[in-house]
Image (cartoon, rainbow, N blue to C red):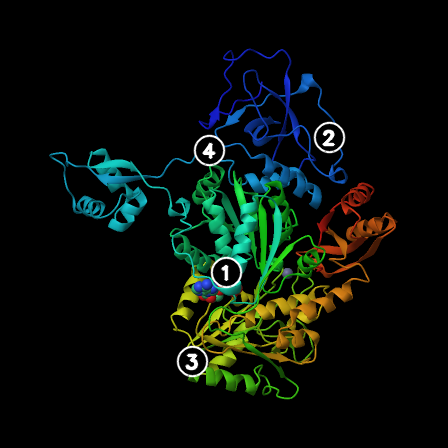
């Protein structure tokens, strides 16, 4: 007899209230654990269980929360994993009970199966992403607040603290215990004491504004010309009420966000839910403000920084259909929408949509799958669409809508390459005099300038001038990065950090350790020396903690409290800085090394995005690219703005070798505690590699990050023609190799990182 879980969330089965069923009914329950599939249980008599019901079940001596799963997987045949052996009817354990939660909708269950099969992950681990927050999310109690009673009971002792609470409670709307106590500057016990004495009445607080109904007619924009045409096309797409994929392409500042808000409006008019995925949650503050201006209320947010209560409340509001618009990071894909009517993926080309840990999946691609499961339209939005998406447009699979010009009087910034060989910076400095002159002039005109360098810290390498020793991470094949403000050397891969040693650890020479190359800290030091009167703001992911700090920095820029912004990739995002007219790219060549298949494409996308921060209002914007290879096709594309030709060239380079998007890649990453275990496992994989037409295996070879967090790593790469489903091949291959002790093999379908 399983131990019954007596949490109040459980609706216990009621023996005798229904006719007992003659045979035990088998149900399949998916648990958020790394099993190969759903487990078999018995439905207790009288408990009518259906797929999607969230239940508690016994597992060993524990009780787990799981979801009643469908008896049959609805997947393409090549995707279906081998079945788990059935459990004999007599050995089935009974489901403990059904939780008082909305059932998981069928499209989400099918989506979970699909993602698991595609990424070769245990389905339970994908389910875990959908359940992570909800296991404890029985109906969240509505938040309670306090209101002052009409009559204060006679004889009440009114201390100053009590008086203060009553004054504040009288002055405003009902507030929670915590809010009331904090505002009054007293302990929560004072509030509770007043309640007990009958001076405060409990009331239900209104739902958070994030779940109020957005009003599509609140403040629609005036649309003309191509904006009006594109907005109409998007609205028509939403009206079709079925799965379709649209690429919305438009230069930075053309009004893409403004226009896709019209698609959201169309969806809201139909009473359907909308999911908006942003690559970076830091962006959500400006997005949310914009949404509020357009629709009169805030959207619901979903990201990893949400507090536990808000997570539960939001999850529940999505499941109940009360959250109409959710804007979030990739994990929002796994929310239990009940009537999803539209998905938007903003900045679809961003590689941060790829989750690299745990279940590795690309949220952009999986968003397309989710839209198909929910039979809803999806819109991919970008100024510089990925080659994958362009190939899909070329093949006629995606629709294509374009905005050609910036909105209003704004024109595209003028981009110029600065040949660093012709106008080098002074010794020991990193900014060319041409760039510093331009910054001085910009600031002199009371306009704002920005310097971009995609590298945190002070210097990427510290070297001993006497013996040539390089400061390396003890756990990784990586140099330690100096962070001078914190007086440390740190590893950007594993987080290891140590104090900057006074002498070289290898030859003991003093004052011999020298920083090589710049990070943003070092550029900031140089800028402070060059422009002593300028108000400088640094925006880097390690100096801005969380969305609120980022929002504050962005507001300061908008309020013109800043002359010069110095930032890492965080400034590249879709910010709107109306007074910013000059962008200087400190090292335009930075992303081109390393032999990554997408290095050139990514550099163009990133630098174009940064450049797009300039000149978004009336004044003309300028962009200067510091480069030692000014003739590189990447620089030429950025200067001409002709990305279509650049992407065609990229396509021509990838097509003959069947590189993505013309073929498929799967990376195998072998990692182990010892080099021998990694080596032997990798070699066994190499030995068993599939030999099939149209399939090629490269490697094994030591990974560029040969040691990461103390683990030794080897890589193999499978490349296949596009029409070959790789999942069955991978399953077969992996089943033939048993990793050595201490070794594991991670599979990365459609890899983005090759480190
Ligand atoms: P994108 O997303 O393409 O970079 P945005 O939608 O952010 O472009 O638009 C750029 C700027 O122009 C924003 O400040 C936006 O509010 C403004 N804008 C764009 N279209 C309109 C419009 N039709 N009416 C008013 N403002 C607009
Ligand atoms: Zn490290």
Instruction: Check whether the beta carbons of the residues at disc 2 and disc 3 lie within 8 A of each other.
Output: no
Above or below 153: residue 383: below
Q: Give the mark, 1 or 2, whose residue is nearer the N terminus.
A: 2
Could you give the CA–CA distance between mark 1 and mark 2, rounded to whole angstroms? 54 Å
Instruction: Check whether the beta carbons of the residues at disc 1 and disc 3 lie within 8 A of each other.
Output: no
Could you give the CA–CA distance between mark 1 and mark 4, rounded to whole angstroms? 45 Å
Could you give the CA–CA distance between mark 2 and mark 3, rounded to whole angstroms? 67 Å
Q: Determine whether the residue tagged by mark 2 lies in a helix, strand or loop.
A: loop
Q: Which corner quadrant holds the N terminus?
A: top right
Residue 458 badge: none
**Which marked residue is nearer to the observer: mark 1 or mark 2?**
1
Q: Give the percent coordinates (x, y) of residue 711.
A: 70, 54
**Which marked residue is nearer to the observer: mark 1 or mark 4?**
1
Residue 190 quadrant: top left
Tell me the crowding category of disc 3: few under 14, some 14 to 19, or many 20 or more residues within 10 angstroms, Cα based. some
- Left or right of 3, for residue 309: left
Residue 549 quadrant: bottom left
Could you give the CA–CA distance between mark 4 and mark 2, rounded to whole angstroms? 31 Å
> Which residue has dot 2 on it?
84
Q: Give the mark, 4 or 2, whose residue is nearer the N terminus.
A: 2
**Res 444 visible:** yes
Above or below 626: residue 127: above
Q: Give the percent coordinates (x, y) of residue 440.
A: 47, 85
Q: Determine whether the residue tagged by mark 4 lies in a helix, strand or loop.
A: loop
737 or 594: nearer the viewer: 594
> Which residue has dot 4 on it?
138
């Amino acid at each position: 007899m399983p131990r019954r879980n007596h949490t109040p969330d459980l609706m216990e089965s009621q023996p005798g209230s229904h006719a007992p069923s003659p045979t035990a009914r088998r149900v399949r329950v998916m648990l958020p654990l790394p099993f190969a599939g759903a487990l078999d249980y018995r439905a207790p008599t009288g408990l009518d269980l259906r797929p999607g019901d969230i239940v508690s079940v016994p597992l060993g001596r524990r009780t787990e929360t799981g979801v009643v799963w469908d008896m049959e997987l609805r997947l393409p045949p090549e995707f279906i994993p081998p079945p788990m052996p059935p459990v004999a009817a007599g050995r089935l354990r009974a489901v403990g009970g059904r939780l008082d939660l909305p059932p998981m909708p069928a499209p989400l269950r099918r989506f979970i199966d699909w993602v698991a099969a595609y990424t070769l992950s245990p389905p339970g681990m994908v389910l875990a992403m959908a359940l992570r927050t909800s296991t404890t999310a029985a109906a969240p109690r509505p938040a309670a607040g306090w209101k002052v009673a009409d009559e204060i009971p006679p004889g009440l002792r009114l201390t100053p603290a009590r008086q203060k609470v009553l004054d504040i409670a009288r002055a405003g709307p009902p507030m929670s215990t915590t809010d009331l106590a904090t505002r009054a500057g007293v302990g929560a016990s004072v509030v509770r004491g007043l309640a007990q004495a009958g001076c405060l009445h409990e009331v239900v607080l209104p739902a958070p504004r994030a779940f109020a109904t957005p009003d599509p007619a609140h403040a629609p924009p005036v649309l003309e010309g191509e904006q009006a045409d594109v907005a109409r096309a998007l609205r028509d797409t939403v009206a079709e009420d079925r799965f379709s994929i649209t690429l919305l392409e438009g230069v930075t500042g053309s009004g893409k966000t403004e226009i896709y808000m019209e698609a959201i409006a169309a969806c809201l008019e139909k009473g359907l839910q909308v999911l908006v995925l942003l690559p970076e949650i830091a962006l959500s503050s400006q997005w949310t403000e914009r949404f509020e201006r357009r629709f009169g209320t805030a959207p619901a947010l979903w990201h990893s920084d949400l507090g536990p209560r808000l997570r539960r409340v939001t999850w529940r509001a999505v499941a109940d259909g009360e959250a109409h618009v959710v804007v979030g990071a990739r994990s929002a894909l796994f929310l239990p929408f009940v009537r999803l009517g539209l998905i938007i993926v903003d900045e679809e080309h961003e590689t941060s949509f790829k989750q690299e840990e745990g279940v590795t999946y690309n949220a952009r691609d999986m968003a397309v799958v989710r839209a198909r499961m929910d039979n809803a339209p999806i819109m991919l939005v970008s100024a510089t669409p990925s080659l994958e998406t362009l190939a899909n447009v070329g093949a006629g699979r995606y629709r294509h809508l374009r905005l050609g010009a910036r909105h209003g009087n704004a024109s595209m910034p003028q981009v110029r390459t600065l040949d660093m060989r012709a106008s080098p910076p002074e010794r020991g400095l990193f900014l060319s005099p041409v760039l510093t002159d331009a910054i001085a002039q910009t600031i002199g005109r009371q306009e704002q300038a920005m310097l971009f360098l995609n590298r945190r810290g002070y210097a990427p390498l510290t070297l001993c001038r006497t013996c040539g020793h390089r400061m390396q991470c003890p756990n990784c094949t990586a140099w330690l990065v100096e962070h001078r403000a914190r007086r440390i050397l740190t590893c950007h891969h594993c987080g290891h950090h140590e104090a900057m040693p006074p002498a070289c650890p290898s030859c003991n020479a003093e004052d011999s350790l020298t920083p090589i190359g710049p990070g943003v800290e070092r550029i900031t030091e140089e800028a402070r020396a060059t422009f002593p009167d300028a108000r400088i703001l640094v925006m880097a992911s390690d100096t801005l903690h969380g969305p609120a700090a980022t929002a504050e920095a962005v507001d300061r820029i908008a309020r013109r409290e800043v002359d010069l912004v110095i930032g890492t990739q965080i400034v590249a995002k879709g910010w709107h800085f109306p007074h910013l007219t000059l962008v200087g790219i400190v090292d335009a060549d930075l992303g081109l090394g390393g032999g990554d298949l997408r290095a050139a494409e990514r550099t163009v996308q990133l630098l174009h995005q940064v450049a797009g921060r300039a000149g978004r209002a009336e004044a003309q914007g300028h962009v200067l690219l510091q480069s030692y290879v000014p003739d590189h096709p990447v620089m030429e594309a950025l200067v001409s703005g002709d990305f279509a030709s650049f992407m065609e060239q990229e396509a021509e380079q990838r097509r003959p070798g069947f590189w993505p998007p013309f073929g498929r890649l799967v990376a195998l990453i072998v990692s182990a505690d010892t080099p021998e275990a990694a080596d032997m496992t990798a070699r066994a994989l190499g030995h068993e590699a599939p030999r099939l037409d149209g399939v090629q295996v490269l490697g094994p070879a030591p990974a560029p990050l040969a040691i990461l967090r103390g683990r030794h790593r080897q890589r193999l790469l499978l490349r296949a023609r596009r029409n070959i489903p790789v999942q069955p091949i991978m399953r077969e291959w992996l089943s033939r190799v048993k990793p050595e002790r201490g070794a594991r093999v991670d599979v990365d379908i459609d890899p983005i990182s090759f480190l």
